[in-house]
Image: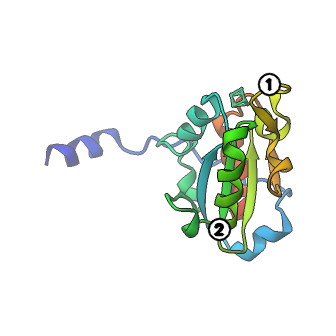
Amino acid sequence: MALWRKIRRHGTVAEPAPPRPEGGRPPAAKALGGSIQVRHVDAGSCNGCEVEIASAFGPVYDVERYGVRLVASPRHADVLLVTGPVTRNMAEPLRRTYEALPGPKLVLALGDCARNCGLFAGAYGVIGPVSDVIPVDLELSGCPPRPEAIVEALRKLTGR
Ligand code: SF4
């Protein structure tokens, strides 16, 4: 009962829903309908992007409202959310994870490192951006991207 009282006292904490993003929906996303299951892969990130992803899925930004859900297995996923530049040790796991997704599938490269290696460009352990290893359907810039931008990018995939 104490928990219920606490929930009642605090009420809803999520931000009001911003307008639906206009355009930018990859054509392949239409095949996924209005909801997506997302598997996240950190290919070599500094974890800054992960902090913002956690916020996007937290109670304030609450991206699950728009039909987005994180899943533990790539076999249950429609979308691969990749952060960081691709390091030598992560290139093959990233490739295999992508192959484990059943189709139709999409890839969102999140953050400057995933797009173009960002701060880590030229580092000895980095082989390149995500698009050098697997096909990318949508990119999101920022170092790290703000939670609002992450929510907007994921809403482009669900169309909600
Ligand atoms: S884009 Fe910025 S925050 Fe994200 S992994 Fe790269 S350095 Fe870290």
Looking at the rendered structure, the kind of residue marked 1 is Ala
Tag on residue 101?
Answer: 2
> Of helix, strand and loop, which one carries label 1?
loop
The answer to whether residue 156 is visible is: no
Q: Earlier in the sequence, mark 2 or mark 1?
A: 2
In front here: 43 or 62?
43
Q: Which residue is mark 1?
A: 123
Classify 94 as above or below 128. Answer: below
When asked about the image quadrant of residue 142, the answer is top right
Disc 2 marks which amino acid? Leu
Disc number at residue 19? none
Q: Nearer the viewer, mark 2 or mark 1?
A: 1
Tell which of 149 and 81 is nearer to you.
81
Between 35 and 106, the one lying in front of the other is 106
How crowded pointer 1 is (Cα within 10 Å; few <14, some 14-19, many 20+) is rated as few
Question: How far across and down, in percent of the image, does residue 152 sit?
Answer: 71, 48
Residue placed furthest toward the left: 1
